[in-house]
Amino acid sequence: MSNRTEISTLGEFGLIRHLTDRIEIKNNSTIKGVGDDAAILSYEDRQVLVTTDLLLEGIHFDLTYVPLKHLGYKSAVVNFSDIYAMNGQPKQITVSLGISKRFSVEDVEDFYAGLKLACDVYGVDIVGGDTSASLTGLCISITCIGEGERDKVVLRSGAQETDLICVSGDLGAAYMGLQLLEREKRIFKGEKDFTPDFTGKEYLLERQLKPEARKDIIEMLRHAGIIPTAMMDISDGLSSELLHISKESNVGCRVYEDRIPIDYQTAAMAEQFNMNLVTAALNGGEDYELLFTVPLTDHDKVSEMKGVKVIGHITKPDLGNYLVGRDGGEVELKAQGWNSLEE
Amino acid sequence: MSNRTEISTLGEFGLIRHLTDRIEIKNNSTIKGVGDDAAILSYEDRQVLVTTDLLLEGIHFDLTYVPLKHLGYKSAVVNFSDIYAMNGQPKQITVSLGISKRFSVEDVEDFYAGLKLACDVYGVDIVGGDTSASLTGLCISITCIGEGERDKVVLRSGAQETDLICVSGDLGAAYMGLQLLEREKRIFKGEKDFTPDFTGKEYLLERQLKPEARKDIIEMLRHAGIIPTAMMDISDGLSSELLHISKESNVGCRVYEDRIPIDYQTAAMAEQFNMNLVTAALNGGEDYELLFTVPLTDHDKVSEMKGVKVIGHITKPDLGNYLVGRDGGEVELKAQGWNSLEE
């Protein structure tokens, strides 16, 4: 059995020190990290990008099947993803935790181990935060600061008529992973000695539990000399994100069902669950892939990029936002993405 | 009776739009605010200061007696205070809210009204955030970004032997305000028609419910040509903060009981509650005053500054940290400050 150290034995300052005292600074832009009223950063001629995410137990994650180390990793990565989606590089994060008595020092260490691993993989410094008691459950708030080159930061609002719409990776797998975990949880509740069999579904679980941000795609775009006209990450589902780009850029879009990248494990799981595969890929959420638009003249360049697929094109705004089916029929895109404030 | 609009009628994106669609940008350093994957800031030759605070219902605030508008104001101000404590200027905040079903759109509007008022008063832009459901209560996470002039940012670690120790304003009033509100809450619970009488205690309530950050002191220091050797804001109580400066600067300190600034309402309330006044002033917390050290040669300058009091001096580290009483006796300073992870 593992040790359990009560957080009260360390206290707030003790816990922060314990978690952050061996943090090494990796970036030149980090002048002063944890330990004062504020962190000090220096961005000189770069632009400063700031994004923040709040993750609440019972709303955004279920600790029945999410290991704390994975949760730490994912909490950091989803913020990095937002910075990459601006064509930037994440450089620093601050981490605030609200922790109920249910959690031990070892639990918080596990969470931090995942957080630090993600920061090592992506070259990001932990520069501050706040730790507090919570009456119920775990509350995680992460702010990520990143840098962007002047004139190379990409907004959602720059898509132009005839631009190509591209996505990285594949879609719907994280959603299927969630469905799988939720099903096993229900089965598990009935049977004490039940051991779930995830053979052949590893990819779905990995996409749900340990997603990666597409730093590699940003690097490939840079090497190829492509600056997307608009970009965002896919966290709430492709449909919802396409509508954001259309609205912010004042354009319309056509995407093609047969162009949407889907992994075979996702397809197999959808069949097993008797779910509509395209719906899962369009509205599933938590993919953390990049959705971006490039000028038609970049067609050959993006076509050669590994892990990037052209799925459609930008139109005039009055042509609306449609999915073109395999049979040529058109279905209007709707934002049915995951939304924590609706039910 | 006031209207109640359920948050679910707007949804997450609707709520964010509703709260942020008329936000005017005040600072040149804010290139792009709410509405993309990240905010874009430009700090050029200035240093970027980042601080964050997590406020949880039932731990950090009690909505029985804290109006939501005041809570919004205070949530912003406590973050600004951390930036001033670096000798910087707050410029942007991101705001993440976790909101349970108990709250209506109007409630969140009240919170935002206070938040926006604070941002107007202090010249700060709201540049992003996140809004989500919460299973229990209200969860507030605010990150503040500020600017500091290179070589003029002040850490906790620069205090030198013989430096003067200064504080702004007066101490202990916010803590007494909290005691007062807690007492009225207990009385109120017994009697339905009880109306609390706060006459003569307005200052204590204001200090607790609507604190201000000491932007004025930072400006006075600049005008006087003083750069403190060390500085922090007093959020956990004077004792606790003095020990931080001593530890980070590797020095000791002597502060004098009869020099500690205390308002007469604080003193009257302590007597009424039969509490030790100096203990309240040393350990009360939530004062949001500035504690700073200056070279002895700045003695005349700081002595002339309105609202600033010299309370002691920095010593060699082996002389320890002591409060010198009115009778000349010395008591070692201990960090008995408010700590949300201890009991």
Image (cartoon, coloured by chain):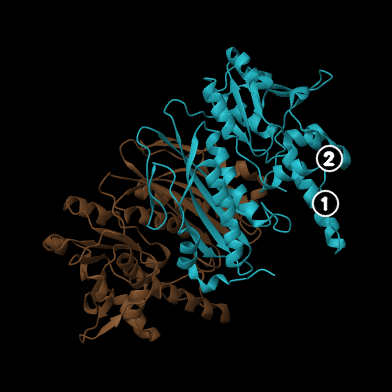
Chain colours: A cyan, B brown
Query: Where residue B323 sits in the image (x, y, percent)?
Result: 27, 78
Which residue is pictured at 55% across the width and 70% down the height? A7
Q: Nearer the viewer, residue B235 or A35?
A: A35
Residue A100 sits in which quadrant? bottom right
Q: Nearer the viewer, residue A128 or A200?
A: A200
Q: Which of the chains bears the disc numbered 2?
A: A
- Say what secondary structure mark 2 lies in: helix
Disc on res. A183 = 1
Q: Could you tell me the amino acid type at mark 2?
A: Met
Within 10 Å of disc 2 (Cα), the crowding (few <14, some 14-19, many 20+) is many
Query: Where residue A52 sits in the image (x, y, percent)?
Result: 53, 46
Which residue is pictured at 24% across the width and 76% down the height? B319
Q: Is residue A191 left or right of residue A68?
A: right
Q: Could you tell me the amino acid type at mark 1?
A: Arg
Query: Where residue A8 sits in the image (x, y, percent)?
Result: 53, 73
Residue A162 shows in this picture = no
Q: Would you name the residue on which mark 2 appears? A: A269
- Answer above or below: position of A274 versus A329: below
Q: Is residue A168 left or right of residue A109?
A: right
Say which label, 1 or 2, has the lower sequence index: 1
Within 10 Å of disc 1 (Cα), the crowding (few <14, some 14-19, many 20+) is few
Disc 1 with disc 2 on a shared chain = yes
Count of labels shown?
2
Q: Nearer the viewer, residue B123 or B250?
A: B250
- Answer above or below: position of B241 versus A151: below
Query: Where residue B286 sits in the image (x, y, percent)?
Result: 39, 67
Disc on res. A216 = none
- Say what secondary structure mark 1 lies in: helix
Q: Which of the chains bears the disc numbered 1?
A: A
Spatial CA distance of label 1 from label 2 is: 12 Å
Quarter of the N terminus of chain A within the rendering: bottom right
Residue A111 sits in which quadrant? bottom right
